[in-house]
Image (cartoon, grey):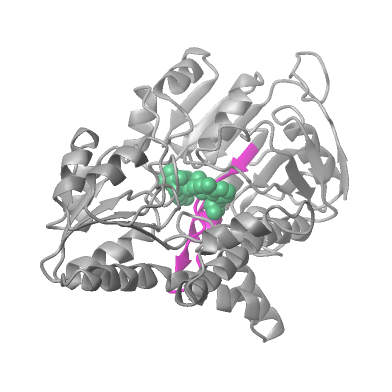
């Protein structure tokens, strides 16, 4: 693997390779929009294509659907005259570079490449000689050079990688929504191409929008590297989640253990336990790796299977701790009032996709608790609760201390910086803190 291009190249007219390009970004979500913005900033003309017509209408009106870009960011992209959000496939005509950033979910536990294949099919109809198509969605090793490339070549009017008329690459997205230090442009970008010409083209393009580009020997290497990154995180979170359960029963604080172990300056990286994993990556991506290993090699990827079991059981463990805590105070879950702090799956984000809070709320409701939820970052909290959790009451951020005072128990699930932990613990009668944000006190229990 070779790294390079320490500084970003500003796109300049007249330069044969770094010329301003017509770039299509397929999928205008958490990954596609920051990529579109980086391309607009670099001087490219960007078509932001999405099948979600409501999202496109909002983007055209200058509204951002994601936390990492503000409405002002979208407005300035539009004002540049180089950003065109569209749901019309005809607008893809004449693209020189296409980035595919569509979802890769699981369907019944197995990878669902439907959106990736649909995106490749629609792009293929607009391929012109020397067009570059790059897959950014997280996929199993072999997908770019397999199903993705085959779909493009089948429909691209004779343009293929082998005849030099089509360039195909893979570049996994590493974006961490809510992270203010590492963002699209300054996070090193892995790139790979289906052949030498594709590799050179994909490297050239990303060097116009990212600070550091790292070239991998093959798309499969980059695909597996992305899955390793997320699997590594998933497995290590599972390790501390399981150890946390044992430590609690042994009367040892897992948080003290982690503080102590983290003083080792080498050979140890800290991961924290929590209420379970969520979002589009951790609960999903390891399954792309284990599914490919199982299908191709006929054997399980044991580490991934175990980590998935441990992390999936974590909301149930939090519920068991809620039950035990209330029981100690002679309170049944049935009829108890429980305030859940945080619906989003991670701190400082309003993203509720695959949030582990979902299972916790369901367990609480099913067992008769009266549940209320406060999350200052989930924009449409009342509507989401009404849709997904009928009967669960939304609490406005301004009312959180009153609600904490009235509840039999506050469960801190998502550790947004916006919560005032000192004030909440002072107001609350009892707290179960799954994130170690509250100060130690007799009425505060930690995971
Ligand atoms: N969100 C993250 O933090 C993150 C980080 C790294 C990688 N990824 C990966 O990036 C990919 C995209 O994730 P995301 O979080 O941006 O998803 P997202 O749901 O936020 O955005 C995807 C967009 O694609 C659109 N779409 C679906 N099918 C389409 C089609 N056929 N044509 C055009 N548009 C289509 C959807 O309407 C949606 O707006 C996934 O593979 C994900 O695993 C996500």
**259 displayed left or right of 27:** right
On the question of residue 415 being in view, the answer is yes
**38 displayed left or right of 348:** right
Quarter occupied by the C terminus: bottom left
Location of residue 186 in the rendering, given as x and y in whole percent from the top left corner? 69, 32
| Residue 71 magenta | no
| Residue 99 magenta | yes
Residue 319 found in image quarter: bottom left
Location of residue 236 in the rendering, given as x and y in whole percent from the top left corner? 62, 64
Location of residue 397 in the rendering, given as x and y in whole percent from the top left corner? 24, 36
Q: Give the farthest residue toward the bottom.
A: 298
Residue at 61% across, 27% down = 38
Location of residue 119 in the rendering, given as x and y in whole percent from the top left corner? 53, 50
Residue at 50% across, 33% down = 48
Residue at 63% across, 46% down = 174
State the extent of the magenta-drawn residues as a range: 98-119
Work out whether residue 400 or residue 55 is closer to the camera in this orientation and state it: 400
Residue 22 found in image quarter: top right
Residue at 67% across, 35% down = 97
């Amino acid at each position: 693997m070779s790294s390079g291009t320490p500084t970003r190249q500003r796109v300049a007219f007249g330069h044969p390779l770094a010329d301003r390009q017509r770039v299509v970004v397929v999928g205008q979500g958490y990954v596609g929009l920051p990529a579109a913005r980086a391309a607009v900033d670099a001087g490219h003309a960007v078509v932001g294509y999405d099948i979600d017509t409501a999202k496109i209408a909002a983007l055209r009106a200058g509204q951002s659907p994601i936390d990492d870009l503000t409405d002002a960011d979208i407005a300035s992209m539009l004002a540049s005259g180089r950003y065109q959000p569209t749901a019309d496939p005809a607008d893809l005509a004449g693209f020189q570079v296409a980035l595919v950033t569509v979802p890769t979910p699981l369907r019944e536990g197995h990878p669902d490449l439907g959106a990736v294949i649909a995106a490749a099919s629609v792009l293929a109809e607009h391929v012109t000689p020397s067009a570059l198509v790059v897959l950014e969605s997280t996929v199993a090793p072999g997908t770019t050079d397999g199903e993705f490339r085959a779909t493009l070549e089948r429909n691209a009017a004779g343009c293929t990688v082998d005849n030099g008329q089509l360039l195909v690459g893979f570049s996994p997205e590493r974006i961490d929504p809510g992270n203010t230090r590492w963002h699209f442009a300054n996070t090193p970008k892995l790139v790979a191409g289906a052949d030498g010409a594709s590799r050179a083209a994909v490297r050239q393009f990303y060097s116009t929008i990212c600070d550091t580009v790292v070239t991998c020997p093959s798309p499969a290497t980059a695909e597996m590297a992305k899955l390793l990154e997320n699997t590594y995180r998933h497995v290590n979170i599972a390790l501390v989640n399981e150890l946390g359960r044992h430590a609690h029963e042994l009367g040892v604080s897992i948080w003290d253990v982690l503080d102590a172990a983290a003083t080792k300056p080498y050979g140890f990286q800290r991961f924290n336990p929590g209420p379970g994993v969520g979002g589009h990556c951790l609960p999903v991506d390891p399954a792309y790796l284990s599914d490919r290993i199982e299908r191709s090699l006929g054997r399980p990827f044991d580490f991934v299977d175990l980590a998935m079991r441990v992390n999936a059981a974590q909301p149930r463990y939090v519920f068991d701790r809620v039950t035990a805590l209330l029981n100690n105070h002679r309170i049944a879950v049935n009829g108890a009032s429980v305030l859940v702090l945080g619906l989003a799956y991670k701190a400082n984000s309003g993203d509720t996709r695959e949030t582990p809070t979902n299972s916790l709320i369901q367990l609480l409701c099913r067992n008769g608790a009266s549940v209320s939820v406060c999350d200052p970052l989930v924009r449409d909290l009342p509507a989401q609760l009404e849709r997904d959790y009928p009967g669960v009451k939304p609490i406005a951020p301004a009312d959180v201390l009153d609600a904490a005072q009235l509840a039999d128990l506050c469960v801190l699930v998502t550790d947004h910086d916006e919560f005032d932990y000192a004030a909440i613990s002072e107001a609350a009668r009892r707290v179960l803190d799954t994130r170690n944000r509250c100060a130690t006190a007799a009425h505060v229990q930690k995971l």
